[in-house]
Amino acid sequence: MKFKHLAFLLFLTVSSIASAQGTVAHVNMEEVINLMPQTSQAEAELNRLRQAYQRDFETSYREYQAKFVKYEDEESTLSPAENEKRKSDLELIERNLAQTQQNIEKQIAEKRKVLFDPIKQQARDLVTKVADNLGFLYVLDSSKDAGLVMAKGKDLMSEVKRALGR
């Protein structure tokens, strides 16, 4: 609802602007996405998820360390077969911890995509609406490393910020 309200205000503001000169404009899409109200909520959710995974991982790692210390302390009193079994157990735990770390990274990346794809789409829709209202046919992304070499055309950032109420 807030997005529609912003779009309506944007339309009213833009409708009073004279037709744009040229057909190409640019905007920093990273900045637009960072300005979207949902971005801070998505970042907070990712941080909570990351912290929960980190706590679980640290608990598992502490358990591994405790077993390692215990096995080291008891190593001289056990048979070679038992020492070999414990060494094998520790190696398995190490592999599991490494796999868990990879799974955590993968799950966070997937969650980031789920959270940010709709935000990116809303940002594109907003920029498209602003550009349409101003009469631009093309909008280039002027974000760092987006491939834009020169940006002398109309920068839509001020209009997009106005549409977001900033």
Image (spheres, helix red, strand yellow):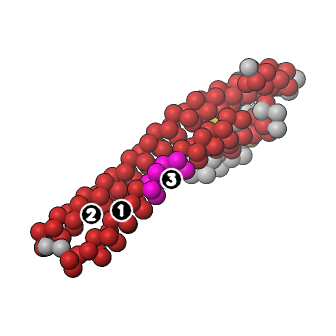
Q: Residue furthest front?
A: 77
The residue stretch that appears in magenta? 51-59
Identify residue for label 2: 90
Secondary structure at badge 1 equals helix
Q: Note whether 119 is above or below 1 in the view shown.
A: below
Main SS of residues in magenta: helix
Label 2: state its secondary structure: helix
Q: Quadrant of the N terminus?
A: top right
Residues at marks 2 and 1 touching, judged by CB atoms closer than 8 Å: yes
Q: Position of residue 66 (x, y in %)?
A: 37, 66
Q: Say which amino acid is labelled 1.
A: Tyr
> How many marks do you count on the picture?
3
Residue marked by disc 1: 64
Residue 26, percent from left and from top: 68, 40
Residue at image coords 58%, 45%:
48
Q: Nearer the viewer, residue 20 or 31?
A: 31
- Residue at left offset 79%, top offset 30%: 163
> Measured along the vertical axis of the image, is residue 137 above or below residue 109?
above
